[in-house]
Structures are given as structure tokens and as C-alpha cells.
Amino acid sequence: MSQHLDELVEKLSLLSVLDMAKLKEKLEHKWGVKAAVAVAAAPAGAAADAAPVAESTEFKVVLEGPIPDDKKISVIKAVREVTGLGLKEAKDLVEGAPKDLKASCPKAEAEEIKKKLTTAGAKVTLKGL
């Protein structure tokens, strides 16, 4: 059993952050669960001393508009890559900006999406949920 787990760890280590996020979503859907980050219990006195700072773990990715004409094709390609939309749907989304690209995704995936789209010439905003 340990050898199988080691092989699985090696295979998972080859996945990109975006593929890892997609895998998480598929497993959540298949198993009917929602992955959550475990929070360690703090000593009772520590909780009273400091107010908790809530950092968002889920983000909405918003494509801001308008997209410059000379950047539209590269942005449409990036949108298709990120969302899996067809050419017409991606073009409509880019031309209708500002639009939500992802309603909710993990921070790592949101940052990777933002990086791809800004490299293509788009303006992207991440909004914590």
C-alpha cells in the first residue's frame, strides 16, 4: 500500500496548480464533499488578545474592460484556455467586459488565471469571498 501511495504522490507532484485545482473540484463533486482548510485551535488566552484576521481562501476572478483592440485576440485565447469556453463565447465575454471569469476558485488558481490574462494584456481583479 505504501508503494502505491508513493507513486500517487509522485504523479500528483507533476500537476500544475491549475490542474490541481481542477482535480480538487472533480473530487469534491464525485465524493459530494467540500474541501476545507483545517484550523488549529489556539490557546484560550490568545483568542481574547487578538482579533482574528480573516483572509479569503476563495476568490472571484473578474475580467475588467474595455480590452484594447490590439490585445483582444491574445486575451480571447487566454480566456478560452482558462475557462474552456468556445471561441464565440470567449469573444463575447471579452467584448462584454467587465465580466466574471470564475465565480469562486482557490487563491492559487485565481492568481494563476490573473497572471495568464495580464500577460495577454487584460486587466483582472481578484475579489475575496
Image (cartoon, helix red, strand yellow):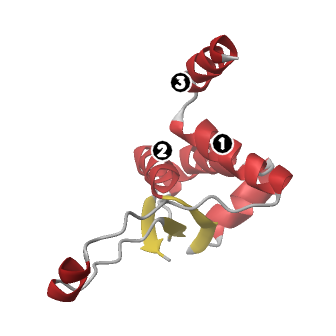
Q: Amino acid at mark 3?
A: Ser
Q: Which mark lies nearer to you, 3 or 2?
A: 3
Q: Which mark is residue 13?
A: 3
Q: Is residue 93 left or right of residue 129?
A: right
Q: Which residue is mark 2?
A: 116
Pick the residue in front: 44 or 28: 44
Depicted 72 relative to depicted 6: above or below: below
Which image quarter holds the N terminus? top right
Judged from the image, the secondary structure of the residue bearing numbered disc 1 is: helix
Residue occupying the far top of the picture: 3
Pick the residue in front: 58 or 68: 58
Judged from the image, the secondary structure of the residue bearing numbered disc 3 is: helix
Q: Amino acid at mark 1?
A: Glu
* Marks 1/2: CA–CA distance: 9 Å
* Marks 3/2: CA–CA distance: 21 Å
Point 18% across, 82% down: residue: 45
Point 14% across, 85% down: residue: 49
Marks 1,2: beta carbons within 8 A:
yes
* Marks 3/1: CA–CA distance: 22 Å
Depicted 7 relative to depicted 94: above or below: above
